[in-house]
Amino acid sequence: MVIQSTSPIIVVANRLPFIVGKDENGKPVRKQCAGGLVTAVAPVVVETNGLWIGWPGVFLEDNLEYIPESSPNDKSPTAGLKSEQVIPVNLPRDQFNAYYNGCCNATFWPLFHSMPDRALFQADKWEAYLSVNEEFAKLTMLAVRRVIAKEPGVVPLVWIHDYHLMCTANFIRSACEAEGITIKLAFFLHIPFPSWDIMRLFPWDDELLQNILGCDSIGFHLEDYCLNFIDCCHRRLGCRIDRQRMLIEHNSRTVSVHPLPISIPYERFESLSKTAEAVVKNNPEEQILLCVDRLDYTKGLVHRIKAFERLLEKHPEHIEKVVLLQVAVPSRTDVKEYQELKEELDMEIGKLNGRFSTPNWSPIRYIYGCVSQEQLAAFYRDSSVALVTPLRDGMNLVAKEFVACQTKEPGVLVLSPFAGAGTAMLEALQVNPYETELFSEVIHRAITMPKDERELRMKLLRKREKERDVNFWLESFLKSVNCYTKTSDSENRLM
Ligand code: GDG
């Protein structure tokens, strides 16, 4: 189903919806990296004749000559996106690194996940962030002009994504004002927005907040994140606010704030799970405890291994009966902190496997890498338990994908309340990942849960996720910016 928008959508995101690589003859080709966001948003950009602005995955020094068209056999959601609808942001390697590693990942990522001790505050990296955001804004203006030239009188909807680009809105707003162009400006944050107590640690918090407020409409996953943002604007900038209606007055404008919990292409995962090949088990009774995470310190991988170790100590009846399957996707591998985390995880897994393995069995199967989405769907379907236990997470899509793939024997979702997903997925077993002792007991409870309870919990979880899938999220967003038009399909959906 393609959702319609009354305005052409210009998406501004750190990355393009595909990476530009080279084929064996050195010619640029598209390489797919379709996540939930791309699957949902790319078709609307295609449909509304919009554009996508982002980093192509290569640096200025790599001399990217052009954006290739999609190949004829491309079935991905970006296949319909013509090269003229894609604007690459070409940046020198040093500037990109200062912005991306130096500020986005070393400052905003830990700070916004309420881990301030890990955050670095460096003036030169913040400067690089601002200059790169300005570059994105300049290219956005190119897109805006292109859209208007094609369809005079149209009001483009510029949709900025995530913590990488929190300071683009004001650059775009001033340029539009100078040129007499009307647009709608929206922003969506994919990670948590922290409380005032955390935000105030950032030395340039006033500048940051004012830049976000350059948008007309601001979306977060949860109401809590919305209220944190509103509170920060009130306390730091002295803005007049209406908490109930989630409105902020700033520079004689009213900015609206919206809770928009993101979700997944539910039907795609469900149907993959119906056809994917079975996961190989040591024996038919073996129960798989599944963990799927980017290898990131916010995801609590080591905390979980410790709880699993405690489980095997206290409940030896699970030895040779359960396997913890960890898929850890490499992430930010050039950053020291992430390299150290990988070493710690390798060590903990090695220690545990060394301690409990028997000649025919090892407690942890560890994949450091990426598996195909088909394989992932099979893992979700064939696991008895999914352990989604981050220390902090904006939403967490893995919890939702697991539920969508429960098309055979119903499994149990164990979920951290510190993931955004924990707010609505109330039928999951909730556990605080810091409480090792209790955590191990919750895993035991999940493994031994009677079938009728598993069935009931999973039925309710599946119903909600099916109704509130990624298309529901997109529709809710378009409604929040008054760009929504009904399609025949959407009339049957729960609003
Ligand atoms: C940020 C926020 C928020 C994982 N392993 C494989 C694989 N994956 C896919 C999953 C899922 C995605 O990666 C991970 O999404 P998460 O939501 O768990 O986490 P982040 O990457 O941290 O995303 C998060 C999200 O933005 C959306 O707003 O929910 O809170 O941090 O879709 O399926 N995919 C494949 N192979 C793997 O091995 N193919």
Image (spheres, helix red, strand yellow):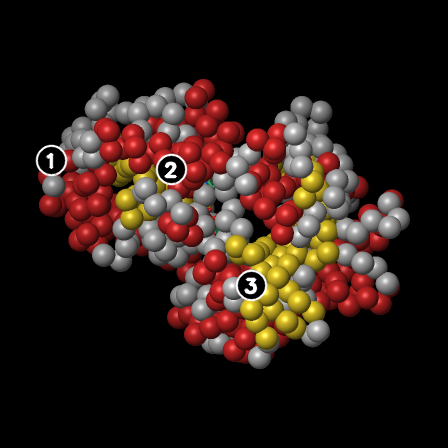
Kindly report the distance in space between the C-alpha atoms of the residues bearing marks 1 and 3: 52 Å
What residue sits right under mark 3 in the picture?
Answer: 246
- Give the mark nearer the N terminus: 1 vs 2: 1
**Three-letter code, disc 1:** Glu
Q: Position of residue 324 (x, y in %)?
A: 27, 38
What residue sits right under mark 2 in the picture?
Answer: 461
What residue sits right under mark 1 in the picture?
Answer: 317
Decide: marks 1, 2 in contact (CB < 8 A)? no
Decide: marks 1, 3 in contact (CB < 8 A)? no
Which of the 4 image quadrants contains residue 38? top right
- Give the mark nearer the N terminus: 3 vs 2: 3
Q: Position of residue 140 (x, y in %)?
A: 75, 55
Circle 1 Cα neighbour tier, 10 Å, few/some/many (<14 / 14–19 / ≥20): few
In this rendered view, identify the residue nearer to me: 482 or 379.
482
Please give left or right for residue 117 compared with residue 223 in the image.
Answer: left
Residue 83 vertical placement versus 477 (above, below): above
